[in-house]
Amino acid sequence: MDIKYLVIIPTFNRRDELRATIRSMHFLQHHPDVKLVVIDDGSTDGTLKMLGQEFPFVLSHKNEKQQGPSYSRNWAAKNYKADYYIFLDSDIEVPYIWWKVITKNLAPHHVLAGKIVNLYTKDVEVGPRCSTFFGGSVPCSPERANVGSSCHLIVPASCFHALDGFDEEIPYYFEDSDLCIRAQKTGYPVKYLDEAVIYHKNQGHKKGKRIQMHVQNRTYAMSKAYQNMPLKLITFFIFNTMWVSIQSGIRGLHLQFHDSLCIWRGWISGNRMFIKRVIEKS
């Protein structure tokens, strides 16, 4: 199958949202060089049946067990060759002009990141962002942007395969920043496109298990990034510990004791993951 652009969408129990996402992609049936593959990560809501009945032109695959978005995206990229991989989520909608903007700006040596706007409030959820030494990202000018969200990320196949895809030890939350950081080190800088907009059905603020996973993955990913730079690694460990203490303390002051504990659990598990990585590679 000759595919130039492969749109990859992982999903889990979002049948109706996925239906709206695909319906918004008018370009799919008008451009023979673009295909959509949906990776069903163990849904129980009849996602695959819906795809077969309503969108027979969509490629699909169902994981035998739930693996997470990183695994699902990697599976698609390994099993379908293309020039560019376009990563989207199953709870977004695409405006009509989006496809023209994307194809106009594609470049073989850049990762493209676009704007994410809340579908209901029209607030900007993700604009241009620049990663910091500590792993978080802050708003910046479009020229300084160096990370993007896997909800709206376009990666040349040459870059994706050189990185061996997303790190599957980071199944979700921060897997996109990790990929962007590694891409830049490999010679594929991130380019932010302000005119490329998708609309997202926001899932709300992170708390509980979600905030634990984010802290864990950020701690692991940034430790991994500094693994061969001892001074930076030590500095990151010190300041990351301070940041975790502050964030946990703030949650405690607001009587969010479970979230406060989850932050520390994430910090512990992230450091354990990194130590295990070092031991395995030594």
Image (cartoon, helix red, strand yellow):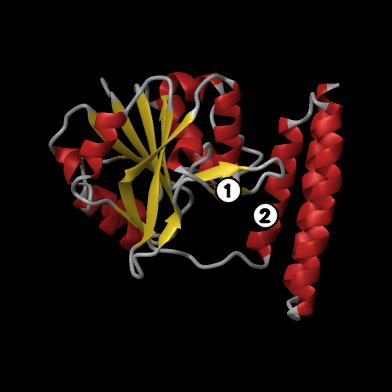
Residue receiving disc 2:
213
How many residues crowd around disc 2 within 10 Å: few (fewer than 14), some, or many (20 or more)?
Answer: many
The local secondary structure at tag 1 comes to loop
For this view, does 144 lie left or right of residue 210? left
Q: Nearer the viewer, residue 106 or 64?
A: 106
Q: How many marks?
A: 2
Query: Horizontal and vertical percent for residue 101?
Result: 25, 38
The quarter holding residue 102 reads top left
Q: Nearer the viewer, residue 249 or 87?
A: 249
Please say if 260 is above or below 47: below
Q: Is residue 217 visible?
A: yes
Q: Nearer the viewer, residue 223 or 282?
A: 223
Circle 1/circle 2 CB separation < 8 Å: yes
Comes first in the chain, label 1 or label 2: 1
The quarter holding residue 2 reads top left
Query: Horizontal and vertical percent for residue 12?
Result: 45, 55
Query: Horizontal and vertical percent for residue 117?
Result: 37, 58
Mark 1 to mark 2 CA distance (whole Å): 8 Å
Q: Nearer the viewer, residue 157 or 280?
A: 157
Could you tell me the amino acid type at mark 2?
A: Met
Q: Which mark is residue 172?
A: 1
Q: Quadrant of the C terminus?
A: top right
Please say if 108 is above or below 41: above
In this view, which residue lies farthest toward the bottom?
A: 255
Query: Horizontal and vertical percent for residue 210?
Result: 63, 61
For this view, does 61 lie left or right of residue 207? left
Residue visible at 38% across and 31% down? 85
Residue visible at 69% across and 46% down? 218
Q: Quadrant of the N terminus?
A: top left
